[in-house]
Image: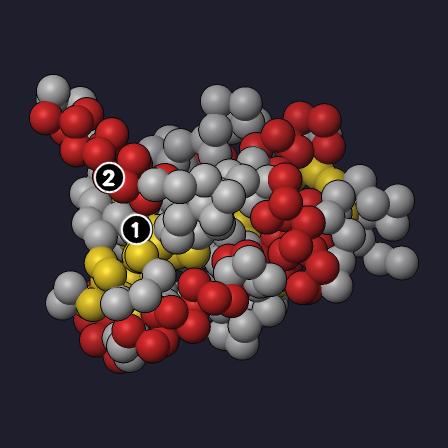
Amino acid sequence: MTTKVLNVWWDSRDVGQLTQDRHGDIAFQYADSWLGDQVTPPLSASLPKRPEQFSRRECRPFFGGLLPEESQRLVAAQALGVSPGNDFALLDRLGGDVAGALQLLPEGELPADVTVNAGAQSTPLDDAGIVRILDALPNRPLLAGEEGLRLSLAGAQSKVPVVVIDGRIALPLPGQPTTHILKPPIARFKGTTENEAFVMSLAAAIGLDVAPRRGKNCGGPSIPPARAI
């Protein structure tokens, strides 16, 4: 079995390669072009810019942290037909858009050339479409496996990244950066949507930096505050 490769891109620039060897161990190495540019930042404080390869122990906390956690990871892995413990396989299926400006793409696949105006091509969802997404999330976290979508967010709560176009929610086009997070209520706890909206509004009122948020109700399941990424 040959080494598997995912190229890491930041704003359509080649950052380096995440690899998985025949034993299942992952490693990361920065691209020479990224290292040679004094302006480019490291991926994280735990992965400082250096020419030497980072081992599984060194790089897994960062790359594993891009994936959903707990039951969200388990159910997403089941939907995709991969092991929940295989970070590389999950990123291969979900890493087209992760938190921040990063993309993890298979060898030979380049970031889509999405312009600022490409969002106009995304079709906003009507209320029935939003409800369909919310109904699908328990069985397919992050809409794992839906054609054209490769999205990932950390955390154990159900959510999905979306784009907002003229105040309306839409699913992103391939390669299109998402702008908001759509978070449904937690089924086993009452009032989680209202509680999060209240706490974020309170934090903003006392001067803390808080992501923009808003809610919507479709006459059925409550659609919680969308949070900007």
Lateral position of residue 52 relative to residue 34, left or right: right
Residue 122, x across and y down, in percent? 29, 76
Callout 2, which amino acid? Ala
The one nearer the camera, 83 or 201, is: 201
Decide if residue 186 is on the left or right side of residue 216.
right
Image vertical order of residue 70 relative to residue 94, above or below: above
Q: Is residue 189 above or below residue 112?
A: above
Q: Quadrant of the N terminus?
A: bottom right
Which residue bears the numbered disc 2? 197
**Regarding mark 1 in the picture, which secondary structure is present there?**
loop
Percent x, y of residue 41:
40, 32
Which residue occupies 54% across, 23% down? 46
As drawn, the residue found furthest toward the front would be 190
Q: How many marks?
A: 2
Crowd tier of the residue under label 1, counting other residues whose Cα lies within 10 Å: few below 14, some 14–19, many 20 or above: many
Q: Please tell me the numbered disc located at residue 224.
A: 1
Q: Amino acid at mark 1?
A: Pro
Q: Could you say where residue 108 lies in the image, as x and y percent from the top left?
A: 60, 68
Q: Quadrant of the C terminus?
A: top left
Label 2: how many residues lie within 10 Å, few (<14), some (14-19) or many (20+)? Answer: some
Residue at 22% in and 52% down: 215
Compared to residue 172, the image places residue 98 above or below, namely above
Image position, residue 166 (x, y; %): 13, 67
Q: Is residue 155 left or right of residue 99?
A: right
**Are the two marked residues, 2 and 1, in contact with CB atoms closer than 8 angstroms?**
yes
The Cα–Cα distance between marks 2 and 1, rounded to whole angstroms, is 8 Å
Viewer-proximal residue among 32 and 173: 173
Q: Is residue 19 visible?
A: no
